[in-house]
């Protein structure tokens, strides 16, 4: 590759990094707003734990910690806070009596749905004028980037 091509590639990569930074900032703001709507004062980290429990209904604490790549002790404290808020409940694991399964309560699911409602259609609206093939191409490219694979394969 020529020096000019290398410089062009690095400029393109920097541009992509800038766009990812903007997207991450928007995403963080949305998480903070959703957390506040679920429970005033809820921290974004607790919201992430809560949404993961809701998505993986019947998850063990160990699996939750693995999924979020977090300390099991911290997960335990956060889950306890979510239980106190009435958002998460524990039930006995029928396959391992020493363990319990974490699930979102009915109240938790209702509050999560209400928190997400204002932004529920934001992505669909943002992509409203895009061609379906462009949306599919973006998905394919992001998948290749996140998995470290060749997007042309």
Image (spheres, helix red, strand yellow):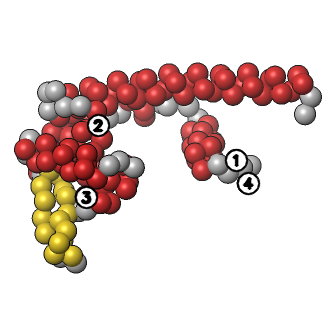
The circle drawn on residue 153 is 4
Q: Is residue 42 above or below residue 152?
A: above
Residue 18: x percent and y percent? 58, 21
Residue bearing mark 1: 151
Cβ atoms at labels 2 and 1 below 8 Å apart: no
What element does badge 1 sit on? Answer: loop
Q: Are marks 1 and 4 in contact (CB under 8 Å)?
A: yes
Q: Which residue is mark 3?
A: 61
Answer whether labels 3 and 2 touch (C-beta < 8 Å).
Answer: no
Pick the quarter of the image with the N terminus. Answer: top right
Instruction: Report, in whole angstroms, how far the alpha carbon at label 4 lies from the one at label 2.
Output: 36 Å
Q: As rendered, which of 137 and 108 lies closer to the eye? A: 108
Numbered disc 2: secondary structure: helix
Q: Real-space Cα distance between discs 4 and 3?
A: 38 Å
Where is residue 54 drawn, in percent x and y? 24, 51
Q: Picture quarter containing residue 119?
A: top left
């Amino acid at each position: 590759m020529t020096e000019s091509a290398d410089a062009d590639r690095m400029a393109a990569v920097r541009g992509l990094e800038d766009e990812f930074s903007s997207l991450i900032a928007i995403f963080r703001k949305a998480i903070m707003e959703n957390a506040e709507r679920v429970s005033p004062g809820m921290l974004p980290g607790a919201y992430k734990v809560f949404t993961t429990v809701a998505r993986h209904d019947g998850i063990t604490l160990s699996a939750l910690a693995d999924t979020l790549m977090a300390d099991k002790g911290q997960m335990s404290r956060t889950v306890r806070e979510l239980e106190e808020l009435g958002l998460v409940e524990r039930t006995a694991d029928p396959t391992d009596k020493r363990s319990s399964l974490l699930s979102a309560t009915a109240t938790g699911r209702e509050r999560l749905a209400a928190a997400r409602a204002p932004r529920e259609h934001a992505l669909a609206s943002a992509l409203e004028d895009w061609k379906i093939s462009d949306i599919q191409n973006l998905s394919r490219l992001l998948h290749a980037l996140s998995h470290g694979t060749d997007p042309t394969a």
